[in-house]
Image (cartoon, grey):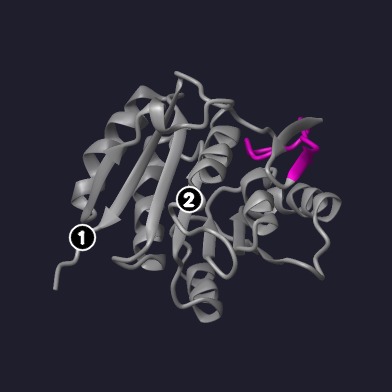
């Protein structure tokens, strides 16, 4: 059991070490870092009631649960094999009658699934993901998915520990090619109670090409 104290109380996450063909059953190091970053800057970023959020590669659901607790409208996504664990954690931490959270299957680059999300929400204020840069072959599908679900007004945050140096290098190379500016958020901006020198946090901004 992983627990995290937040401004909205304790979040308790049940991990699933027996999950096959996915790393989504583990709360990785970057997830609490990004969660507490949002907590720290929620007022400055005007995150709260009716902020429309999309989480990519949600895994056990820690960040999405927190975002729902502070009033955001959250679409939380991952591959099909992860969804039962994700649903279990949502149900044990949230009263669905009091929050706005949807769980959707999404494999990056899957046009049908992307279209299904767009039909429900035409745009998002924030798109984020933690520990989702780990495989060179998944970088372009990830960025293509973000591109189709974001606008120039969308705040995009990607947080991860370097697990594959080649994937990290390729991600930084490909972001500009997909027409995004990227900046690293320094550790001084992370939450003082949850920072980790191994974890990198980036903000992406979509370039207006018109």
Above or below, 123 relative to 180? below
On screen, 8 above or below 151? above
Secondary-structure class at tag 2: strand
Q: Nearer the viewer, residue 139 or 21?
A: 139
Residue position for label 1: 207
Q: Which residue is disc 2 drawn over? A: 128
Left or right for 72, reference 65: left
Where disc 1 sits, the SS reads loop
**3D distance between C-alphas at marks 2 and 1:** 17 Å
In which quadrant will I find the N terminus? top right
Residue 134 seen by the camera: no
Q: Residue at x 60, y 57 (%)?
A: 77
Quick one: which residue is furthest to the left in this view? 210
Q: In the image, residue 49 lies at what x, y percent? A: 60, 67
Q: Is 74 above or below relative to 59? A: below
Residue neighbourhood size for the residue with mark 1, other residues' Cα within 10 Å, grouped as few (<14), some (14–19), many (≥20): some
Task: Report x, y in % for residue 185.
Answer: 35, 35
Q: Residue at x 60, y 34 (%)?
A: 32
Q: Is residue 66 above or below residue 30?
A: below
Q: Position of residue 14 (x, y in %)?
A: 80, 37
Q: Would you say 97 lies left or right of 22 here?
A: right
Q: Specify whether residue 42 is in view.
A: yes
Name the residue: 31% across, 49% down. Answer: 204
> Magenta region, mostly helix, strand or loop?
loop
For the residues labelled 2 and 1, say whether their Cβ atoms are less than 8 Å apart.
no
For label 2, count other residues whose C-alpha is less than 10 Å away and answer few (under 14), some (14-19) or many (20+): many
Q: Position of residue 122 (x, y in %)?
A: 46, 78
User: Magenta residues?
Assistant: 9-25
Q: Residue furthest bottom?
A: 119
Front in this rendered view, residue 83 or 180: 180
Sequence order check, earlier mark of 2 and 1: 2
Q: Magenta includes 103? A: no
């Amino acid at each position: 059991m992983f627990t995290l104290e937040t401004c909205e109380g304790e979040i308790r996450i049940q991990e699933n070490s027996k999950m096959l063909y996915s790393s989504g059953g583990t709360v990785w190091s970057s997830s609490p870092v990004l969660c507490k970053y949002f907590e720290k800057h929620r007022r400055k970023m005007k995150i709260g009631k009716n902020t429309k959020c999309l989480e990519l590669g949600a895994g056990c659901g820690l960040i999405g649960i927190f975002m729902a607790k502070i009033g955001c409208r959250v679409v939380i996504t991952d591959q099909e094999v992860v969804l039962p664990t994700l649903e279990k954690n949502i149900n044990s931490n949230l009263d669905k009658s009091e929050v706005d959270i949807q769980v959707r299957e999404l494999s990056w680059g899957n046009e049908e699934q992307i279209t299904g999300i767009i039909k429900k929400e035409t745009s998002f204020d924030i798109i984020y993901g933690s520990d989702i840069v780990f495989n060179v072959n998944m970088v372009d599908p990830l960025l293509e998915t973000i591109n189709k679900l974001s606008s120039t007004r969308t705040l995009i945050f990607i947080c991860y520990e370097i697990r594959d140096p080649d994937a990290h290098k390729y991600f930084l190379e490909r972001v500009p090619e997909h027409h995004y500016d990227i900046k690293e958020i320094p550790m001084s901006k992370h939450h003082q109670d949850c920072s980790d020198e191994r974890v990198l946090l980036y903000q992406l901004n979509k370039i207006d090409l018109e």
